[in-house]
Amino acid sequence: MPIRIRLDRLLVERRMSLTELADRVGVTIANLSILKTGKARAVRFSTLAALCRELDCQPGDLMRFDPGPSDEVEDDLD
């Protein structure tokens, strides 16, 4: 997957634990862990907005598009 999640970096920069973020956002630690490790297949916009609010960041600060030579971008807009 060419989308990389950079939640770890933001947590360190904000000196915040995953547990604290989960409490503030209203998401389980397990679900945040899935997101943090890059295993999530989708993120709700409401969750993304809550993460950005609590981390004082933009969506692009949380995610990065980093394609490799064999990664194909799927077009789900058809």
Image (tube, grey):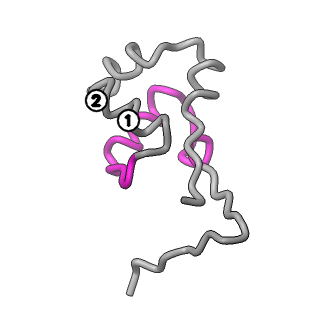
| Residue span colored magenta | 40-63
Residue farthest to the bottom? 78
* Tag 1 residue: 50
Question: Earlier along the polypeptide chain: callout 2 or callout 1?
Answer: 2
Q: Quadrant of the N terminus?
A: bottom right
Which residue sits at x=32%, y=34%?
Answer: 31
Left or right, 15 with reference to 44? right
| Residue receiving disc 2 | 27
Q: Residue 40, how many percent across, how many down? A: 39, 47
What mark, if any, has residue 33 been given in the picture? Answer: none
- Say left or right for 31 vs 7: left
Task: Please identify the residue farthest to the right as the structure is shown.
Answer: 69
Q: Nearer the viewer, residue 55 or 3?
A: 3
In the rendered view, tell whether residue 61 sits above or below residue 33. below
Name which residue lies at 47% across and 80% down: 75
Label 2 close to label 1 by CB (< 8 Å): yes
Query: Could you tell me residue 2's position as x and y percent?
Result: 60, 60
Element type at mark 1: helix
Q: How far is mark 2 from mark 1, CA to CA?
A: 10 Å
Secondary element type, mark 2 = loop
Q: Nearer the viewer, residue 67 or 58?
A: 67
